[in-house]
Image (spheres, rainbow, N blue to C red):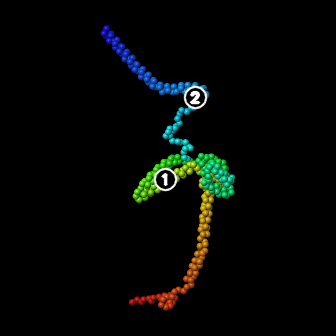
Amino acid sequence: MDVGGRRRRGVRLTAAALVALLALAGCGSDAGDNADSAPAAAPAERDRGGDAADQAGGAAEPGAGKAEPGAGKAEPGAGAGAPDLRVDQRSIIYTGTMRVQVEDVDDAARSAIATVTAAGGFVGGDQRRSADADARAELELRVPAAKFHGVVEELAKLGRQQRREIRTEDVTEQMVDLDARIITQRARVESARRLLAKATSINDLVSLENELSRREADLASLVAKKERLADLTSLSTITVSLVGPDASTADEETEVGFMVGLRGGWKVFLTSMTVLLTVLGAVLPWLLVIGVPLTVLLVVLRRRRRTSPPPAMPGGPAAPLPTGPPPVPAARSGP
């Protein structure tokens, strides 16, 4: 009886311990499930609330409740500290070079100037050479950067485009750096002015005035650099070469060969002869006024020297010089 009772008590205790362990495990899993399902329940409640609101407001239009694809995705770099990489927010310098062959250089030049003026630009330089069909015009045009490409296309339609070169330079970082340096330099100038106002001795006044002048000069230099960059970014430069129908297609600087060298040498020879004749024409009046009398004077002096008698010897008339052969010494006799 005692042994059987002990065995039954042991079985009951073991069963009770297993039940307690299972109960504890169930409570932990329920708590975890509730915690995991809590965030998902809130959107479900919101969805139900939104559906109820839609039903209360009336029937929705077809597709009105559907979100656009990718509408919930954030764009790359949309954070608060992300840099603005849009082209319209950057400082870019555009520079273009063109060569266009036209029938009438003067008419094409007038059309190019009218195009630039209509775009809000102006002519920075105008050089022309009129030689009938070999005429040439070099125009330096300044146009707003926003209308740069449009003006280039309009200029290309003036005739037959032979060459086009477009260059860009991004100076955004330089502009940002200049802005920061200008702010710092202005603060330094203001600090020097405050110190100058508090100076009491002559030495302090002189040294502070020199320092203030130096800082103001540095500030003016930085401001000038920024204004120059701002001018280049706001107004782009287009250099257009308008040539006549007889102009060579190839650029003169790229031509090589014997004939090219011969033409270049002939041009240099003509230029040298022109310079030499110019110098000779400038010196010739002086030669006539000074050189001719001086030459006549030298000729007269030489003739006088030739016709003048030899100078007399001191102490009487000069003895006649012997004309015969010199005397032969007598032979000595032997002892």
> Does the rendering let one see residue 199?
yes
At label 1, counting other C-alpha atoms closer than 10 Å, the crowd grade (few under 14, some 14-19, many 20 or more) is many
Return the residue nearer the eye: 18 or 207.
207
Residue lying at 51% horizontally and 86% vertically, measured from the top left = 311
> Does the rendering let one see residue 255?
no
Estimate the x, y position of residue 202 in percent, counting from the top left.
41, 59
Note whether 79 is above or below 278 in the view shown.
above
Q: Give the mark count.
A: 2
* Residue identifier under label 2: 65
Dot 2 lies on which element? loop
Return the residue nearer the eye: 9 or 193.
193
* Residue identifier under label 1: 219
Dot 1 lies on which element? helix
In this image, 202 relative to 251: left or right? Answer: left
Estimate the x, y position of residue 321 in percent, counting from the top left.
51, 88
Estimate the x, y position of residue 306 in percent, counting from the top left.
56, 83
Q: Amino acid at mark 2?
A: Gly
**Quadrant containing the N terminus in the rendered view:** top left
Residue lying at 50% horizontally and 26% vertically, measured from the top left = 42
Residue lying at 67% horizontally and 54% vertically, measured from the top left = 106
Please report whichever mark, 1 or 2, sits nearer to the chain's N-terminal start. Answer: 2
Q: Amino acid at mark 1?
A: Leu
Q: Which quadrant of the view contains residue 248?
A: bottom right
